[in-house]
Image (spheres, rainbow, N blue to C red):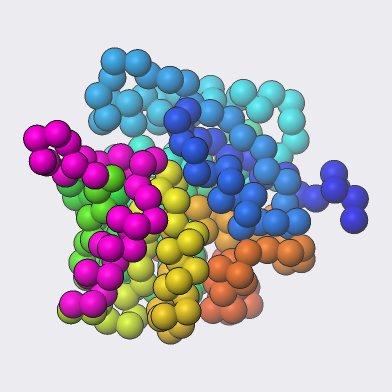
Amino acid sequence: MDLFSLPRLGVVVPPENPTAEPEFNHLLGTGLNVYTARFPTTPGLGLRRMLETYNEVLPDTLGDFGGLRLDATVVACSASHYLLDPAGDRAFCEELSVRVRHPVRSSTQAVLAACEALGVSRLTLVSPYEPWLTDVSRAYWERAGLTVDGVVLVPAGRTPEGAEHYDPYAVGLPSLRERLRAHLGGRRPPVDSALLFTGTGMATLAALHELAREEPARVLLTSNLASAWWARRVTGTRGGQVHPLLRRLDAGDPPGGLTAGRPRGATA
């Protein structure tokens, strides 16, 4: 295999995100080559203003790839695109695609494309975000026409005062597993309610591997998993050794998944 003949995927990530690149490389295996650019740091800005800044500087950040020829790019920052409604998010991505002359999609639009192809109309959100941002996330999916059956909040820990502390980059597998067990062990969501782990910064592959064995009939999605799924389809990549979770999505995706119908809130 000629390593450098593989399709090239660009990934744009927040500066402190420790998860996106390892998960993309692990998911895509030998199918695509992954190249990254990072948003600039935003010292002193609050979370919402930081996310707004990411949207403002995204065109310039895509320019950081310079003359590198890419076949597709994923913006691996769901939270900034939750601030846009699904139609605005789609239009923004289309504008960027024209600008850089290859398909560009946010991870949020990739999730919508996967939901359309897989026939998913209901979600249960697993969110490491602060409650206000989780509410923004929920509103985004509902505006896209999806039913949100419930939300599992996953804090990273507690402050010295005892309040729950939220940081997607600091969520460990034990706390994620504990919250999922508590939710799924109680009033279980309907089997047709896909579990969506929101955001690109929370490490999820180990938890999903366990859930895939326990709930084989349920669709499991993450921002990174859906983005890898979209990238393979938009670049026409079906070969290579890929992660079992990606193969699991492939098995549930009918032929022509991205072209069988216009994805809800997204385009191929």
Left or right of residue 147, residue 174 in this image: right
Q: Is residue 83 visible?
A: yes
- Residue at 69%, 24% (x, y): give it: 66
Q: Please report the residue visible at 59 percent of the width from the left and 50 percent of the height from the top.
A: 24
Q: Is residue 263 visible?
A: no
Residue 226 spot, x, y in % from top left: 50, 59
**Residue 57 falls in image quadrant:** top left
Q: Nearer the viewer, residue 154 or 35?
A: 154
- Name which residue lies at 75% across and 35% down: 69
Instruction: Answer above or below: position of 39 versus 71.
Output: above
* Quadrant containing the C terminus in the rendered view: bottom right
**Apparent side of residue 40 relative to residue 154 in the rendered image (left or right):** right
- Count the marks: 0
Residue at image point 67% right, 37% down? 35
Task: Specify the quadrant that holds the N terminus.
Answer: bottom right
Percent x, y for residue 172?
Answer: 37, 50
Farthest left residue?
161
Q: Which residues are magenta?
A: 157-186
In this view, 161 is above or below 31 = above
